[in-house]
Image (cartoon, rainbow, N blue to C red):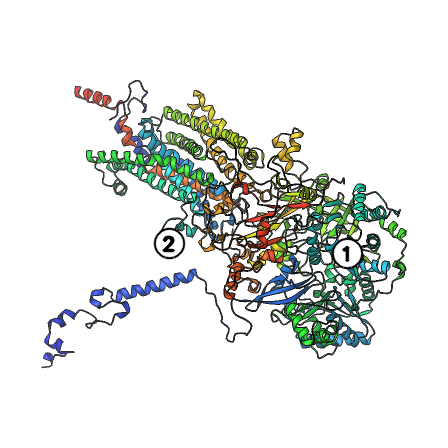
Amino acid sequence: MGNNTKYWKSLDELNETPEFLANKANEFPEPLPSEVFGIESNENSGTNRRDFLKFLGFGIGAAALASCEAPVNKTIPYLVKPEEITPGVANWYASTFSDGYDYCSVLVKTREGRPIKIEGNPLSKITQGGVNARVQGSVLSLYDSNRLRGAVNGKDSSAVSWEDLDKSVVAGLEKAAAEGKTIAILSSTILSPSTHKVIASFAAKYPTTKHVSYDAVSQAAIPEANLKSFGKKVTPSYDFSKAKVIVSFGADFLVNWLSPVEFSKQYSQTRKVSKEKPEMSKHVHFESLLSVTGANADYRFPVQPSLMGSALVQLYNALTGGSLPSGNKVHEEGIKKTADWLNANKGNALVVCGLNDVNAQMIVNEINKHLNSYGSTINLDTPLMTRQGNDMALEALVNEMKEGKVGALITYNCNPAYNTSSMLGFVAAMGKVGLKVSFSGTLNETASQCDFVAPDHHYLESWNDAMPKAGHLSLSQPAIAPLFKTRAAQDSLLRWSGSNSDYQSFLKNVWATEFFPRQSAYADALTFWNKSLHDGVAEISSGTVPAVEKAPAPKAKDAPAPESGSADLSSVASALTSVKGGEFEIVLYEKAAVGDGSSTGHNPWLLEFPDPISKVSWANYITMNPEDMRAKGFGLLERQERIGSKTKLTLGSYTFENDIPVFPLPGQARGTIGLALGYGLKGSKAATHADGVNAFPIVQWVNGMAQYYAAGASVAGETGEFEFACTQQQHTMMGRKIVNETDLQTYKEKAPYDPTTKTGWNIPTLVPTITKDGSHAPKSPDEVTLWDEHPKPGHFWSMAIDLNSCTGCGSCVISCHAENNVPVVGKDQVAKTRDMHWLRIDRYFSSPMNKEKGKAEGLGKVQTYLEMEFPATDNPKVVFQPMMCQHCDNAPCETVCPVLATNHSMEGLNVMTYNRCIGTRYCANNCPFKVRRFNWFNYTGKEKFADLNPTHESNELERMVLNPDVVVRTRGVMEKCSMCIQRIQEGKLEAKKAGTKVEDGKIQTACAQSCPTDAITFGDLHDENSAVAKLYKDERMYKVLDDIGIQPTVFYLTKVRNDEGEVKI
Amino acid sequence: MQKEAAIRQPLILGDNVTCKKISDDIIKPIEGKAPRSWYIAFSIAAVMFLWGIGCLAYTVGVGIGTWGSNNGVDWAWDITNFVWWIGIGHAGTLISAVLLLFRQKWRMAINRSAEAMTIFAVMCAAIFVVLHTGRPWLDYWLFPLPNAFGSLWPNFNSPLLWDVFAVSTYFTVSLVFWYIGLIPDFAMIRDRMVKPGMKKFYKILSFGWSGRVKDWNRFEEVSLVLAGLSTPLVFSVHSIVSMDFATSILPGWHTTIFPPYFVAGAIFSGFAMVQTLLLIMRKVFRLEHYITIKHIEYMNIVIIVTGSMVGVAYLSELFISWYSGVEYEAYAFLNRATGPYMIAYYAMMTCNVISPQLFWFKKIRTNLHLTFILSIVVNIGMWFERFVIIVPTLCRTFIPSTWNMYSPTFVDVGIFIGTIGMFFTFFLLFARFFPVIAQAELKTILKSSSEQAHKQSTSGGHH
């Protein structure tokens, strides 16, 4: 019975209808809802479960593959958006850079709260919108991963809480005070009047406090000499802009001496020539090495340092007809001519001297007195406040330390264990000090010897002020909240002196009570403060100079001459001219980018920046005259050789432990050895990579003054080989018209081009063409082009570079580096000519050989060309030429790219599409200027570059400096100058928002903005009234290599030298 | 069957060479065991090849920064090697296509290996084209493929793009031409093979060739058509390669003489490489009957002619650079001859201009040892020619501040060695498994064959 029981699920099954039978085999007899597949019915679609699994598998596989390709970048939106921040829009804050070496009023560009770029503050009457390379680079030091994250014990670098640190330090200070021992605050020059006040209030609490300031590169002789000559212990302010004749004795005033940005601005005003103002200053330079300033001089005389004093006295004698004892004759004709020029320009002349020697400075004072410079080019009443360090006070302090009389030493913004002379014995003396505290932001040579390190903020995180010159104030404000648990040094001092005030209110109070009354522009203190904070600078009456320290009690052995204006010049002169020379005299100097190294020696941008003169990066090396090197048998690096020699350098009893590379420098006085200061720092990967020697220990200490030269140096023969990371290996122009130059007289008197004689000082490029009737008709290369012109309906961006103003300082190079996220590639890559600088400065020396001479001497072409490759060894003329993408209208790079990765924009720019580039490098080969830069490696990802490259993905801190408007390039991609297209875009958008045309000067490329001599002008050629369009019509205008028909958009203005007439050297 | 002039020396030597003997001789290396020397040579080549693969993998993994190139000398060994290999790849097609059209029968003994050499040389060259880019994985952007980037096409103005087309076309046509020629020979081997595996292998390769008249008819027609197609390619490829240089603006590159000069140079180096290979092969495989002194001499004559053309090109370049009066142009050539790379220049001059002139002496051009040595010298010289064109030019261009020096790294050298290894690896495999002489064609010029056959048949009738 049960066997017949039939169970059924539906009537259809029971009745076995045809539909049921047809569907019986299907898993789902009913059609599935299949809208997801966009298909009407399951049967017809053919998409079944298996297909679904295939889709799923494919989907997962594809997703997995896709995720291999694109890295996940996290973007965290603001939960609460700060009022002043709009993502994508930069905020600018006025601030002040002052590290004891440089001063600069700056504007800080911040994006989403991160400072990413430093630019000059045009409102400053001192720096006038100029910035130098070191200040440009300072933004990177904010994100230096070597910075201390908080207070530490110096010796074992273990962290310590600020409370514990304060307790211990105060206890130590009180103990020292109780014992009557000195509490010394040692600092570099402090420009901040408020900080001086903080120190004063600290001294009030601890009466045994003594504040000593010193400079790593000292100019202490200037105030000392002025004390003797004029009874005023000040460094005067100089005005180069009023000088028609400038004579410098070893003062590298364009990049290093006292206030280089200010002086560059002033100097460039005297060097700009035009048909309206066909006058320029005459610059005569006496120096031992070849400095950037010397390279810009109209006349330059190499002098050994031991003869520098003699040269000075001889100039004095020649000027005044005096007969001071003048030692050996130096450059007789040159000195006579210089004296004639100076005497002819009394009241408009300026003589400066970089020797840190009181006697030399006193002679200079006498010369300037004779020239009536005081009151015109030199102002003693508005003293300059930079480099106010006191060498004698430092020596006295070290002696006190040695005697165990110093109970506590606080070092602020200085690194004496690194940058003082070994003759002082600072490190040993430090051991005898009870309590040692450093404010250093990193664990530097001094801090690591201290008991406590109370790290100061970076200047971009702190409040401060500065008075670089009496009456000129400048304010610093934080552009970012402190990144780490650091504390302003002033706050620490205030806390230790028992004050409850913080430095910000202290500062505000100083401004309200001290400075507000000394101005009349603003009626209330708050407006004055707000306006000053906004502008970054303020002008007040110069009043009495605050905080000029008194000269320490002189010790018997180096008693200075009596304080009067009538010093015995004769004895001064005989002391000056009796300096002994030797086979080799060593001269210590500072480089344009590294300076004294204090805030720059760890900065990869600045270390990779090639020295403007030698073009060597990433090394400290000896420079010698090539002839001296030939005599010694050193490698001369001729004909693009990169491998040079290393040698052992000995000075007296001091021998450098490491062998030092030797680099040939034409123009350097024979018998001299140059060595840069500021290298050999320890601790950072960048400084280790640079691996230079520290030259500070051989700074001489003579009569209580640091002296930066010494006789009696000796070099051994070649002890090894060294590969120089040199960005330029051919030093002469080979007779090509790359830099066009003329002299002032020719410029004034002659037409740029005389078609009848086919001569002139700016001969236009003409292509020989022939007409149908057979006559010759030379035409401009622009007229004979085969190409159709690119349409430029709107703007036509162009750039003018005035070779007369450019001093080669390199501010633009670092500015470009920061603006465009250019990678740092390190020593070995630079040595392979793989530096990534979008903008480089070419430096050419003159050669004693030229084609005419070769012909006259019957040398033959091969020999003539060979000799043209070598620069004049003794006194070559030097030119600098900033070189970047010339944005050719007929760009040769564009036609050869197989994938159209480089194109012409509608605004006359040659643009790169990075993500289209496959890296054939054909464009770079075909670029006549060789300005294209290839990413040979993954500079942002390869392990090797992690140590140096701020754009490297592992450097999360350093990467905060990146400009978010500019993409970071990947491996295998070509890059080059874009003329800051992101800035052009921003400027155009601003104008669009405002409903106006783009105003001339509103858009500035990074290089043009930062140039301290305004040598670079950017603008729209289609705007007839723009500065660049006017310069385009200038008689001095020429384009490099326009004879090959590429039509460069960047153009140069002929260099004019004020050097008619040869002067024998 | 073609008619040969009775007074001409036969192209195949030996009294008792018959069709069967040809088949026997050609199949011997395939059927028999490879000699020890083959295994030794193959091992060396394979190791070199592997070393090159390693260097290439390193380059692709890390970037072409592993090479010696820099931001002034952006091309160096990569493009030098590329042009060198492409040049070598010229002889094969020239021999098989141009000489076919000109009915030069002597080509039949050598065209098969010359074509194989072409294929392998172009493969070596392709390695450099493909991997010299910064991002080789994006090389496909060089082709005008439909894409999702909008209407983004390659730049048809760029000679590099012409290069891509020229080389890929050349490779394709040469490969097809070579393979078509191989079909009857594969069929012959298939028919003789005893081992079933190998028989199957050659069966597949021979595409079902039956040897009917229809097959032969089509074979001949296709060969003729492909010869017609290849002939312009012989001239176009190297002309276009030369345009990579000639259309640029660099002094030393920007010269109109480049296309003919490059073609002549390519044939020159191609024939030299054919000499090098055949001299070994005829010895090892005992093919002296087929690749005779006559062949060697003919090829040496081609080498004198093309070598002299190259020499004239060098001299006219120098003359024009002086005559132009253009500063940069004049200096570029002066720099080649007197600059820091003058050794390369004189190596090029000696090897390419002077050494082939020795072939004017019949004694030298019929001397196998000297021919072998000179053929290698010529290829060394041709490598230096490409190096001289590329590196010293780029080292010193318009702006003196950018002048610099170049030196190769071990990777540069390794990749070059690797391509040589790859070339010989493939060639040795070819010699072992493929008919190295186009036996089907060769049989058509067996002058004595019908007479001998007749003799044999009549003498056989007596028995």
User: Relative to A450, does residue B185 appear above or below in the rendering?
Assistant: above
Q: Position of residue B333 (x, y in %)?
A: 54, 34
Q: Is residue B436 left or right of residue A1049?
A: left
Q: Is residue B41 visible?
A: no
- Whether callout 1 and callout 2 share a subunit is answered no
Q: Residue furthest bottom?
A: A1
Q: Position of residue B445 (x, y in %)?
A: 28, 26
User: Relative to B270, does residue A87 appear above or below in the rendering?
Assistant: below
Closest to the observer, B180 or B418:
B180
Q: Which mark is residue A377?
A: 1
Closest to the observer, A851 or B2:
A851
Q: Which residue is mark 2?
A: B151
Parent chain of label 1: A
Task: Give the amino acid at mark 2.
Answer: Ser
Secondary structure state at the residue bearing disc 1: loop
Secondary structure state at the residue bearing disc 2: loop
Q: Position of residue A485 (x, y in %)?
A: 63, 72
* Point 62% across, 37% down: residue: A759
The label nearer to you, 1 versus 2, is 1
User: Relative to B223, does residue A96 appear above or below in the rendering?
Assistant: below
